[in-house]
Amino acid sequence: MSTESSPGVKRRSGGTLGLSRWASGPRQGLLAAVDLLGATLIGLVRLLRGRRREASAAFGLAFQRYGLESLPVVGLIAFAGGLVLTLLGLKELGKVGVEGMAPKVVGIVLLREIGPLITGIALAGRVASSVAAEIAAARASGEMAALRDRGLHPADVLVAPRVLALLVAGPLLVAYADALALAGSGFYASVAMGRPGWLHLADVWSGLTLKHAVAALAKGAAFGFVVGLAGAYHGLRASGAADVGARVRDAVVSAVIAVGVAETLLIFVFKWIRF
């Protein structure tokens, strides 16, 4: 049974409850995005208040899929990124005679920018596609209509738990990526430079402050949020099983763009508040 033919869908076709009414065109697409955002925020409030048992179970499963199972790819890219950035930083700063500043500069860039961006791009590529595919499959199989018939809003069960899981997993993955990036930096210092890794990391640590860590974690949460919304938005737009592939592709593209936009906005926000 399609969601369009469900009586539950017809009863809930307005405001933030009209997730099944998707129209083409930029204006309608923007309204649909705002509609999804509102429904998701409401669903998050209900989830945090413990009003949806199904949503709580979905959150645990989503956290495992999107957070824990992303650790290998995030860790590998972060370790390589820390190694390469240390190599380039020492080389380029050495040309102007300030090689001693390289550990501090590298540490700040790794913690505040590289770690969050690695996490955001990894989530955009790996997780946005999964969110879109799962929600599109639920829509095509009639699960959304079944939820409505039971008096449950699809955003509460299908969208909000996934977005909350990414909100929580994002900062944790950023912390993990930062740790692996610093490990890669120390590894390069010990192997290529013959300098004890702990001494290099001590120099790196001396340039870091609490605000750098807070900014990095905030970016992780923001990237997780926009990636979850991008995946859900395109998953809900799927018109059938044959359309899932296209929506998964669009979800990845949109998620990457959203991460880039969020990164740019946060840079200006942190600069404005001098953080």
Image (cartoon, grey):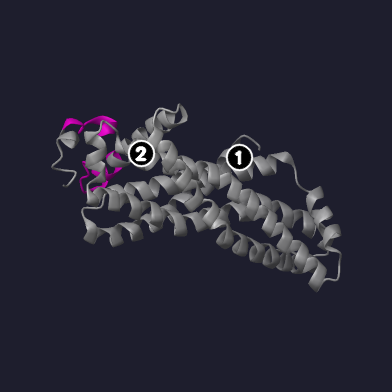
Which image quadrant for residue 77?
bottom right
Counting labels gives: 2
Please state if 25 lies on the left or on the right of 270 as rendered: left
Q: Which residue is mark 2?
A: 157
Q: Is residue 77 above or below residue 11?
A: below
The crowd level at tag 1 (other Cα within 10 Å; few <14, some 14-19, many 20+) is: few
Instruction: Tell me the residue at 25%/33% (across/down).
Output: 150
Name the secondary structure under disc 1. Answer: helix
**Could you tell me if residue 19 is visible in this image?**
no
Which image quadrant for residue 270?
top right
Q: Which residue is mark 1?
A: 270
Q: Is residue 21 magenta?
A: yes
Which mark is nearer the camera, 2 or 1? 2
Instruction: Tell me the residue at 58%/61% (across/down).
Output: 72
Task: Read off the magenta span.
Answer: 11-31
Instruction: Tell me the residue at 50%/50% (across/down).
Output: 64
Q: Nearer the viewer, residue 136 or 274?
A: 136
Q: Nearer the viewer, residue 61 or 67?
A: 61
Q: Is residue 181 above or below residue 153?
A: below
Calculate the distance from the C-alpha at mark 2 to the C-alpha at mark 1: 34 Å
Please state if 139 lies on the left or on the right of 263 as rendered: left
Of the 4 image quadrants, the one containing the C terminus is top right
Q: Is residue 100 above or below residue 61?
A: below
Please state if 185 lies on the left or on the right of 67 as rendered: right
